[in-house]
Amino acid sequence: MVTSSILVLFLLGFIAAGILAAASKILHVEEDPRIALVENCFPGANCGGCGFPGCSAAAAAVVKGQAAPEVCVAGGADIATNIAAIMGTEVAFKEPKVAANICTGGSRANLLFDYEGVEDCRAEALLYGGEKSCGLGCIGLGSCVKVCGFDAIRLTDDGLPIVDMNACRSCGKCAEVCPTGAVRISGMTMDLLHLNEIDDCLAPCMQKCPAQIDVRTYINQMKKGDMRGALLTMKERNPLPLAVGRLCPAPCETICRRNIADEGVAIHTLHRFVADWEMNSGSRLSLTCNPLSGHKVAIIGSGPAGLSCAYFLRRVGHQPVIFEKRDVAGGMMKGIIPEYRLPEKVVDWEIQSIFDLGVEVRTGVEFGKDITVKQLEDEGFEAIFMATGAWKVPALGIENGDSENVLDAISFLAGVGKEFSDLKGKKIVVIGDTNTAMDVVRSASRLGAETAAIIPCIQRKMSANKKEVERAAELGSDLKFLTEPVRVIAENGKVSGVEYRELQYDDPKKATGKPKPVEGSEQSMDADYIIVASDRVADTDVFRTESGEQLFELDKKTGGIKTDPMTMQTSVPNVFAGGEVHTGRSILIQAVADGRCAARGIHYFVTKGEIPEISNPQLRVIPESILKNMEVIYTIPRIKVPEISVEERKSTFKEEVTGSIVYDEARKESSRCLRCGLTCYDSEAGAEYAADSDVHKFNEA
Amino acid sequence: MEYFLLFISATFINNIVLVQYLGACPFMGTSKSTDVAIGMGSAVIFVILMATAFTWPLQHYVLDPYGIGYLQTIVFILVIASLVQFVEMFLKKAIPPLYKSLGLFLPLITTNCAVLGVAIMVQRSEYSFVKSLVFAFSSGVGFLVALVIISSIRERLDIAPVPSVFRGVPIALIMAGIMSLAFFAFKGMAA
């Protein structure tokens, strides 16, 4: 019995082993040994973040050439290098991405109901769309925390996810489970090229800013004393913070929710403070740029739009080359905008920071004369960005309008400090209601001239900023509102005066429509110079072919080059346009915004061949974000910005009117920010300054 | 009718996992998601069928004639393990797509007591070869049904407010117990 048992078992075992041995020979499958080697390199997280079902599949894909050595999202550069060594290749640059939470609401977002069901954001979102009144914000039940395989997310006491940048492997699981889109995976390119969408949590200030600067975030960083972080936040959207901090009319401040409670936050002042903080430190913040992609882009014009486009293109990895007609880069910022508003040294510092990224500039090259679209294409430029600005001042178009000493505002401002260094005893009449007109008035007044301005509307209707008009009046200029020139009085072809008449609206109270001349109101005044600053338009004569045809379709409204509003693409697919050559006379921040918009379009055009449409672009203020009432606990007085005296302004030219604020003041002003979300806000803003004598509770004030 | 009753009996009344308590380890281990559960269940059906097809003749033509039936367990383990290894090699070479979809589960089944249990049960019940195969297939289906049900429950439990001490396997075991009680309701419907 025992013998037969042993024999049967032995026989069976022998047969089984024999069959398996034979099978292993016959059914042997050749497998690339590199698959095992590559798989050994992976950390074995099997997270699926790479898009393959597990590490084995990813390893097989790498060996087959279907995936790059840097496929693993859980591993760092070391792992990619090791895999590349096995595969005999090199590691390509992989832009780091991390998860980020866009919601700042947390527990302060109003509750719709008390949810006592399954503790999962998705379940709650499916039930009623979330327990919070804000449909875009974080629900706060931490589904993202539960799915994170790398312990990179935690919830704050406010119920908001905080991502540990060092631990995050951007596997995307958190973004996948977030039903509201509050958690997103983003990288530098994505951040730089993202245009605001109505699905984003946009505070009113962010909606109103043409450049879409994340105001809320940088002010919060300032509040914490993180000036470096604040500057980096700014530079995600604005490469010219020094210039914008001095020149921007700050539409963001007019819509600031704090206006409902007391006075709006001094956003513009804070913006300038952060920009000055870097310049005053003497060292530049290093900015990251992707390695060169090999795509060359020509930019015509080195003004704010051109510089902005070059900056964004270089940061995402392309190679922009700026062609500038003049000998200096900077457009109107250099030599046209007066020194007391934007000092030359500030412009130089600012522009240098963009050139330092590796942007090439070729000065003294005029488009249409020295270079053409065809030549640029032949030189290997895949796209061209037209940013030549609006330098042409329309002629006066009245009798003797071409007399000697009738100048356009640009020529005058360019000559300030050169041919116009002393205007004592001279009478200068400026015609126009623009910021440029006010620049001329203020510059001429500083040079000692007696100035007057003929303005064809009331002050409220002027296109110049309110502050600019006030400053012009402070210098003693005679601002003649609701007047228009009739004819230039000339003697021997040279200006000696101007005849003008009064205007009146059909309904003076409403002041709508175009004012009409008042019969018999003609008067005259003496003038040594008449400076025309009625408007500035793009000179489109240069955009013609040799046979005289227009290169691009023109915009009938602005007179500039017509473009697609979201892509900035002209009627010629590889040519884009932005800034004043597209919009006509506008503010600096608009040119910066156009530059970024064009950079986005160009990036997609040169890399993918087509520019994806934005699904829900934010084009106007989101109605639900405009609140009527707010309950804010503390009232803190808005910061007073130091200004030099009017007398001092008359005697000096190279001083700025408004000075800079100090660090502690900047932080205190930052604390006034309500850190608004789309519908939520921080009602306890400024609580840390509650003990200060100038801070009160609203019910005590 | 006889085969139908056999199918109902093996699948529901005498469910291999929830009534016979065999194969509890893969039942717990591979029931976290329904996709995996379906893969595992399908692989078990395939292997149980193959194992029964090989062990039945071995029992009737080798072990019984030589009077060495007491070697049944060790012989069946040897045969099933070798069989699974062979099937794995064959599928890898001949049908790579099927190997990919089953590949992960085949080695897991090598020491699955549900497979061995079914092979032994058909011998004890003295079924014919065809009946044995029907019984094996039905038991495999029973395993699949139980696995799919519990994986569906566990997917929901993942997002449920379960006290932390019960999270994971403890609550899954409680669920398995309740499911087992539910399956006992089939008792008496047939043999």
Image (cartoon, helix red, strand yellow):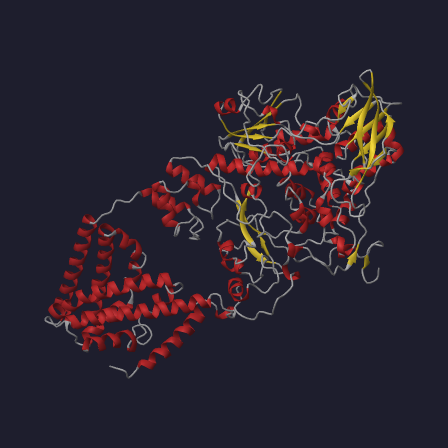
Please, is residue A611 above or below residue A622 in the view? Answer: above
Residue drawn at x 33%, y 63% is B38
Q: Is residue A601 left or right of residue A59?
A: right
Inspect this view and state whether residue A644 appears.
no
Name the foreground residue: A688 vs B22: A688
> To which quarter of the image does residue A653 belong?
top right
Inspect this view and state whether residue A43 appears.
yes
Residue closest to the far bottom: B188
Q: Measuring from the top left, give residue B125's x and y in whole percent.
A: 19, 77
Please, is residue A441 above or below residue A593 in the view? Answer: above
Residue closest to the far front: A519
Q: Measuring from the top left, give residue A689's x and y in whole percent.
A: 78, 54
Residue drawn at x 76%, y 57% is A687
Q: Measuring from the top left, give residue A1's x and y in whole percent.
A: 12, 70
Q: Measuring from the top left, give residue A485's x and y in whole percent.
A: 80, 30
Name the foreground residue: A437 vs A177: A437
> To which quarter of the image does residue A403 belong?
top right
Name the foreground residue: B84 vs A194: A194
